[in-house]
Amino acid sequence: MKRSIAGLMVLAMVLCLASCGSKEADLKDMAKDLLDSGAFTDQLNEPAEGVAQQIYGFDAADVQEYVMYYGTGATAEEIFLAKCTDSAAAKRIQGLCQTRVQNQVATFESYVPTEVPKLQNAVVGTAGQYAVLVVSNDSYTCQGIVEKYLNG
């Protein structure tokens, strides 16, 4: 568990430190690039309306727009990208993303333990008013895509 929290904190700090140059990002384009990157082993799909809010527990007043994709349940892979009302809201959403990862680690440790490293290496963080969570088979590639959109 210490390793997963340390990994999350490192990735979160990288995104936060790079946030000085955050720019306007198209969440749908970023999600498409992530999906097309080859970093996912599962088939990811968009959930029905309202499912993301239930899963993450965010206050709708904090989020202007979001995109979510999640897998079949056989893997922990998912994408959650949010444009928040401000950087304080983005930090709150980041906290919810970290909680999501911790909850998923607890679930997958006994369900599919081979998925835990994906969660431990999740890209989670903020850049300005944006918050992101990407759980994939290739966090390095996904981190590069996220940084291109948010800090490029």
Image (cartoon, rainbow, N blue to C red):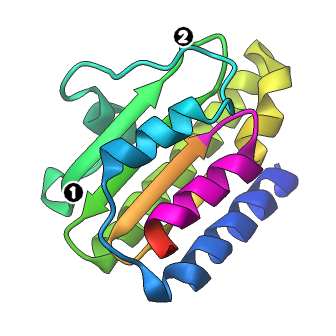
Return the disc, 2 or 1, that comes first in the chain's sequence. 1
- Tell me the kind of residue under disc 2: Thr
Q: Tag 1: Cα neighbours inside 10 Å, few (<14), some, or many (≥20)? A: many
Q: Which residue is mark 2?
A: 72
- Tell me the kind of residue under disc 1: Val
Q: Which residues are magenta?
A: 135-149
Whether residue 140 is visible: yes
Q: Quadrant of residue 85?
A: bottom left
Whether residue 125 is visible: no
Q: Is residue 41 left or right of residue 34?
A: right
> Looking at the image, which is closer to me, 31 or 123?
31
> Looking at the image, which is closer to me, 48 or 30?
30
Q: Tag 2: Cα neighbours inside 10 Å, few (<14), some, or many (≥20)? A: few
Q: Main secondary structure of the magenta part?
A: helix
Q: Position of residue 4 (x, y in %)?
A: 79, 51
Residue 53's place in the image compared with 90, above or below, is: above
